[in-house]
Image (cartoon, rainbow, N blue to C red):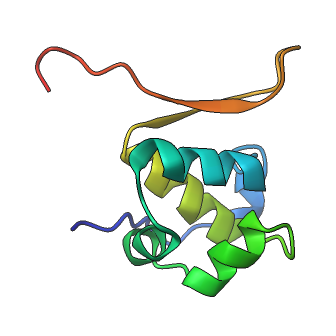
């Protein structure tokens, strides 16, 4: 199992990138058939952080949300922004070479 990692950076610059909400996180995991523990292992975040986020008990720090979102994107999730129909997630279309 590979984990997603990024070089150190200023997470304040990532606010526009970290738009994932708790429902999108739950839906993305469901599409991938991942448990909270699996997302935790792949992202480096704690399972408790993910559980609290998905149950709307707390919002992780920007850097943690960034890692969660990028881990899910790396696994094939595409985040759909608000476009009049609401936010969402979907699996990216796979190319025939994959």
Name the residue: 40% across, 52% down: 33
Which residue is rendered at x = 64% and y = 71% of the image?
A: 64
Residue 65 location (% of width, % of height): 67, 63
Height in image: 49 above or below 23? below
- Where residue 56 appears, as percent x and y from the top left, is 85, 67
In the image, 41: left or right of 80? left
Most distant residue in the left direction? 97
Residue 21 visible in this rendered orientation of the protein: no
Residue shown at 55% from the left, 64% from the top: 67
**Number of marks in the image?**
0
Please tell me whether residue 47 is drawn above or below residue 38 in the rendered image: below
Q: In the displayed structure, does residue 91 sit left or right of residue 86?
A: left
**Whole-percent x, y for residue 77 in the image:** 47, 38
Which corner quadrant of the image does residue 71 belong to? bottom left
* Residue at x-position 77% and y-position 30%: 87
Left or right: 64 with respect to 22? left
What is the quadrant of the N terminus in the image?
bottom left
The quadrant of the rendering that contains the C terminus is top left
- Up-down: is 57 above or below 11? below
Asked where in the image residue 7 lies, by quadrant, the reply is: bottom left
Residue 55 % position (x, y): 79, 68
Work out whether residue 33 or residue 79 is closer to the camera in this orientation and state it. Answer: 33
| Residue in front for this viewpoint, 74 or 12 | 74
């Amino acid at each position: 199992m590979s984990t997603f990692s990024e070089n150190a950076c200023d997470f304040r610059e990532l606010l526009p990138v970290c738009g994932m909400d708790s429902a999108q996180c739950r839906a993305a995991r469901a599409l991938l058939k991942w448990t909270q523990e699996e997302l935790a292992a792949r992202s480096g975040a704690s399972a408790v952080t993910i559980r609290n986020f998905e149950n709307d008990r707390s919002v992780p720090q920007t850097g943690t949300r960034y890692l969660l979102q990028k881990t899910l994107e790396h696994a094939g999730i595409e985040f759909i922004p608000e476009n009049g129909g609401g936010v969402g997630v979907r699996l990216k279309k796979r190319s025939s070479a994959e």
